[in-house]
Image (spheres, rainbow, N blue to C red):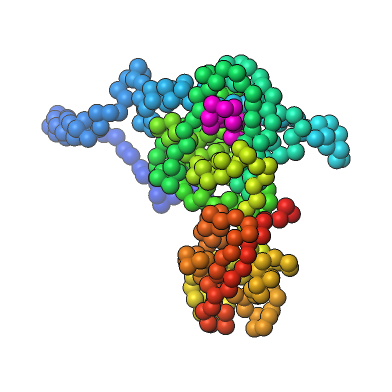
Amino acid sequence: MVTDKSDSNDSSSPHECLVTARWLSPKMLMTASLVLGLLLGYLASWIPSSLPLSSNTTSSILYDEALVTSLFEEASQAVVEISVLRKPNTTFLQSQSAHGAASGFFVDDLGHIVTSYHVVNDAEDIKVHLHDGRILSATILGTSPADDLAMLQVDIDDTDSIKPLVLADSDQIKPGQMAIAIGSPFRNFNSVSVGVVSGKERSRTSVLLRPIPDLIQTDAALNPGNSGGPLLNRQGEVIGINSSVEIVSSVQIGVGFAVSSNTLKGILSELTVRGEIRRPWIGISGTPITKSISDSLNLPTETGIYIRRVWDGSPAHKSNLRGDLQRIPTGQGDIITAVDGVRVGTITSMVSYLNTLKPGDSITLTIVRDKKSMEIDLILDPWPDT
């Protein structure tokens, strides 16, 4: 247990600072005034002129309020609230249909709306609430459960009223840059929160238990109802689709994640014409190799992906890849060091590369087995539903 010394009332604390007061002589007062004047002059020269000097200023240290206000007024016209009626749930203590609400945004003027897959999964009825008060029925055009993305379609006559959002190049964002989230948290329609890009290339698992690579981490406040809404840069372009938050002991801790706009770009056209997008599957579970893992298992390399298990009937199984849980023949699993010549050191980096391919494509794995490097070819399968 760690004790915070600042909360201690122990008068015998060795860190206690005792201050006594006494009268100052005129000479001491003059010296003190001179020192104080010099100090104030130094501080005045150090304080940036951009800091707010009165309550009437329209900017803050964190962000430009005028910029965020104008950005919200423009971008919020493309953001919608999505109401979902799910299939009846007859499990114990719940026998009524489940209602849900989340967010989405127009990506063109043809009525196409992007949202999160988990928002519309198992939906029986979907309604979309536009910024001007209209409520439209929506249908699901395409989904990518592995990426937590979905495309909806609404029929709208006056396409001039739709101002779709532009997708940015999420590879160009940097930690520390402004991040603005717009959505309907707790059904508070078109709410805005401001933060920064906290990190890039994060990873969390989808509903299919497949890693979603290249996630954007942000400290912009995300709450239930923000899912599917846009995460914007200071130009008002979409850098991510808000997807999830980190929860510790049932408490949200201010760490949110968004699917990168480049992930959406890669499948955008498919989402408008296909039912469900299936990502590639090799059929292994593995661990990124670190020095400590390499030392403990006496591995011949300190980089790569160490195969722990090979799933029966998978492409990896058909190509005779070995996992250490099979204990064949030496008890050590194969180590994947590259895919099609592209070096991989983490599961995320391998999944990112596989996302450029499709089921049915052939790949060549460079592996280390029994301290010897070799190549193995396999044909990718679709990622299984379960």
In terms of image quadrants, where is residue 44? top left
Left or right of 304: which side holds 276? right
Q: Give whichever of 363, 284 is nearer the camera.
A: 363
Q: Where is residue 125 in the image (x, y as percent from the top left)?
A: 75, 29
Q: What residue sits 49% from the left and 30% below the top?
A: 165
> Which residue is located at x 38 percent, y 22 percent?
66
Magenta run includes residue 360: no
In the image: residue 297, left or right of residue 38: right
Q: Which residue is drawn at 81% across and 31% down?
A: 97
Q: Nearer the viewer, residue 187 or 210?
A: 210
Q: Give the range drawn in magenta.
A: 102-117
Counting from the top left corner in percent of width and height, residue 296 is at 56, 76
Q: In this view, does 351 lie above or below 300?
A: above
On screen, 374 above or below 63? below
Is residue 66 depicted above or below 207 in this figure?
A: above
In this view, 89 is above or below 184: below
Residue 278 horizontal side relative to residue 165, left or right:
right
Residue 244 visible in image: no
Residue 175 is situated, as x and y percent measured from the top left of the image, at 41, 45
Q: In which quarter of the image is residue 32?
A: top left
Q: Which residue appears at 57% of the width and 27% of the height? A: 110
Examine the structure image and report whether residue 107 is included in the region drawn in magenta: yes
Of the 4 image quadrants, the one containing the C terminus is bottom right
- Disc count in the image? 0
Which one is in front, 151 or 86? 151
Q: Is residue 16 something one can see in this rendering?
A: yes
Residue 277: % across, % down: 64, 47
Screen quadrant of the N terminus: bottom right
